[in-house]
Image (spheres, grey):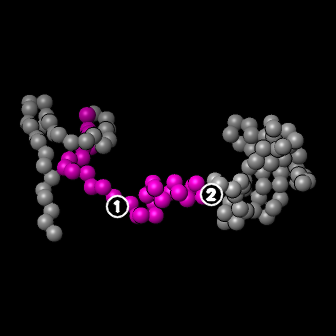
Amino acid sequence: MHMQKAKSAVKNTGAGSLIQGRKVASAARGMTLVRVGRAVKAAVPQSDQAGVLVAKAARALKHPGIDRSVVFRDEGVVSYSVNPADPSQFIREASDGSQTLGYVVRGKFQEVEPKAVKK
C-alpha cells in the first residue's frame, strides 16, 4: 500500500510561518495546532449507518413504552417519569423496583417524602 505524503504550504515571513491546514486548537501567545493533509474518514460499520438506525428506531417507536430490561441493564441505574397525579412532581424508579416521589430542583432530584410511592 502506497501512502502519499501530506501536502502543505509553508511560507516563511518575518513574523513567523504561514501554514495551510485546519485549525485544531489554540493556546496562549499565538501557539496554534494545525492539521495538514487530507482527513481520514473513519469506517462506519453497516449496523451503525443512518438507514439501518432509522429502521431500528421506527420499529422501536411503533410500540409504546420501553422494556424494563433495556432501561435497567446495570445496578444503580434509575429512571424518572412524571407523576400522573401531579405533573409538577417526578417519580424516580430504581433497578430494584422501588419508587420515590420528588421534584427536580436546580438539576438535582429532591425527595418529597422518604417513603416509597405506592402504585
- Whole-percent x, y for residue 65 in the image: 72, 55
Mark sitting on residue 60: 2
| Quarter of the N terminus within the rendering | bottom left
Mark 2 or mark 1, which has the lower sequence index?
1
Question: What range of the chain is rendered magenta?
Answer: 30-59
Task: Specify the quadrant of the image occupied by residue 28.
Answer: top left
Q: Secondary structure at mark 1?
A: loop
Image-quadrant location for residue 110: top right
Q: Picture quarter containing residue 2? A: bottom left
Q: Image point 70% across, 66% down: which residue?
A: 69
Q: Residue at x 17, y 40 (%)?
A: 20
**Residue projecting furthest to the top:** 15
From the top left corner, tell me how far across and down residue 48 is, in percent.
45, 60
Task: Answer whether residue 39 is magenta in the image.
Answer: yes
Residue drawn at (27%, 40%) of the image: 23
Note whether residue 110 is visible: no
Q: Which residue is mark 1?
A: 43
Left or right of 70: which side holds 110? right
Residue 17 or residue 107, whichever sits in front: 107
- Judged left or right of residue 64, residue 27 is left
Q: How far apart, in angstroms, are the residues tagged by discs 2 and 1?
A: 26 Å
Amino acid of disc 1: Ala
Give left or right: position of 118 versus 61. Answer: right
Q: Residue at x 21, y 42 (%)?
A: 21
Residue 29 makes an appearance in the image? yes
In the image, is 117 to the left or to the right of 7? right
Q: Nearer the viewer, residue 113 or 74?
A: 74
